[in-house]
Amino acid sequence: MPRFLQILALLLFFNVLHAQEEIVRSVYFEFDKFNVDDTQQKDLLKFVQATDSTRIESVQIFGYTDDIGKDDYNFKLSTKRANTIKDHLISNGIKSKIIVTIEGKGRILIDDDIVENLPEKRSKNRRVDVVINLKPLPKLIMPGVYSTVQKNHVIGDRILLEDVLFEKGSSKLTTKAKNDLDKMALLFQRYKNLEFEIQGHVCCTPSYYKEAIDKDTKKRQLSTNRAQAVYKYLSFRRVDKKRMTFKGYGNTRPLGREPEYDRRVEIVITKI
């Protein structure tokens, strides 16, 4: 079995990253109504149930109306809509204690100069937003896998760059990624004996495509571009190019966790 797969098989536990996420699902209502049809109820429940329950921190429910009618009436109507959704979730097994907000916000005003598709715009405002706040993504901790450069590496050690994660279809380094690479460059300058391969990865491509398309270059070489972006940045930060190589591995080495982890770059120690 390849060493990489052996490492994955020895997965021990998860720690916590710092960023928090939220996902939103909207439920739409008929004019002056606060009940929803069976199809929307089922779709909402599927949406909530499809969310990783171990990551749900809390649920917030916000009701709205269109701009027709008086403020007081619309406030009451939006509150009824929010409570309808709350009751539906609780009756289908969602624990009431995680629903931390149930609020009617009244009407959503439309700018005076908007006249095109006005009925459609108003229909989109007759809604309830269900906001699911998620706990931070878990951080993988595995034997032989590190979050930064160590003094005493062995050949084959992997450095999983926790903050060097990319947007979908992108090979551009974020500010957060550059900050992480700045620290790593200083460590590589300190431990000048280390040589390494920079490995780029992608997620979510069909099995018959091993590589993904970079939305900027329009070429199917996204994982290679991600690895090269890190290579160029470390070189810019005075890490000797002779110590580094880079290679794209496409979707061939998924971590088996959330897709965010597979839009990544890793560093593998090749010489000490």
Image (cartoon, helix red, strand yellow):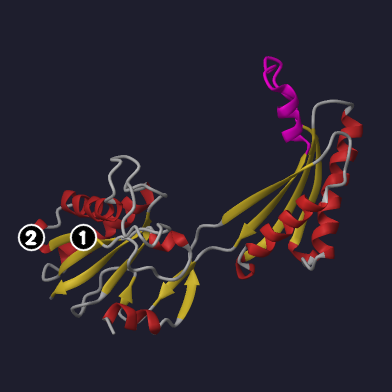
Residue depicted at x 30% and y 80%:
144
Question: In percent of the image, x 85 and y 58: which residue is there?
Answer: 87
Q: Residues within 10 Å of mark 2 (few under 14, many from 20)?
A: few
> For the residue carrying disc 1, how many other residues have a C-alpha within 10 Å: few (<14), some (14-19), or many (20+)?
some
Most extreme residue toward the front, as rendered? 208
Residue 232 numbered tag: none
Residue under numbered circle 1: 247
- In the rendered structure, does residue 80 fall within the stretch colored magenta? no
Residue located at (68% from left, 64% from top): 49
Which of the two labelled residues, at mark 1 and mark 2, occupies the earlier sequence position? 2
Question: Horizontal and vertical percent for residue 81?
Answer: 84, 45
Q: Secondary structure at mark 2?
A: helix
Circle 1 — which element?
strand
For the record, the magenta segment spans 108-126
Disc number lying in front (1 or 2): 1
Residue type pointed to by label 1: Lys
Question: Where is mark 2, residue-wise?
Answer: 242
